[in-house]
Amino acid sequence: MGVDKKKLHRRKMVAPIFVSAIMVLYYIAYFAVIIKFIDGILAILLGIIPLALCGTIIYVCIQRIKEIRNGEEDDLSQY
C-alpha cells in the first residue's frame, strides 16, 4: 500500500503553514502593543516594519506551498 501523493504533499505543507501562522500572529500582537503604548506617527512608523514582515512571511509561505505541490519538496538539493 503506497501513500497517496496528495496526502504526502499535505503533510509537508503543515509545518510551513503552522510556522507562518505563528509568526504572523506574533507580529500582529507586536504591532498592537506598539499602537497601544506609543502614540502618533512614531507608532505608525514602528508598526510598518512588523506589518511588512507579515506580508513577506505570507508571500514566502505561498511560494513554499507552490513548490511542494509541484514536487520540489527538497529545495536544498538545488544548491
Image: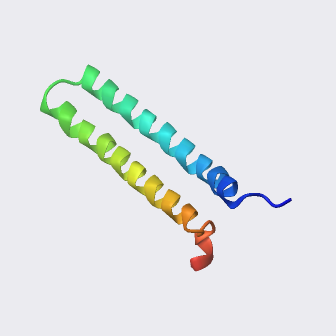
Q: Position of residue 59 (x, y in %)?
A: 39, 54
Percent position of residue 45, x then y: 19, 39
For the point 42% across and 50% down, the residue is 57
Front one among 22 and 38:
22
Q: In this view, does 64 lie above or below 58?
A: below
Count numbered badges in the picture. 0
Q: Report whether 12 appears left or right of 37.
A: right
Residue 48 point in image, percent of width and height: 24, 41
Q: In which quarter of the image is residue 24?
A: top left
Q: Which residue lies furthest to the bottom in this view?
A: 79
Apparent side of residue 31 relative to residue 19 in the rendered image (left or right): left
In the rendered view, how is the structure colored? rainbow
Q: Residue furthest right?
A: 1
Q: Furthest-top residue in view?
A: 36
Quarter of the image for residue 73 reads bottom right
Quadrant placement of the C terminus: bottom right
Give the quadrant of the N terminus: bottom right
55 to the left or right of 71? left
Q: What residue do we see at 63% from left, 76% from top?
A: 77
Identify the residue at horizontal 39%, vertical 37% (top origin): 27
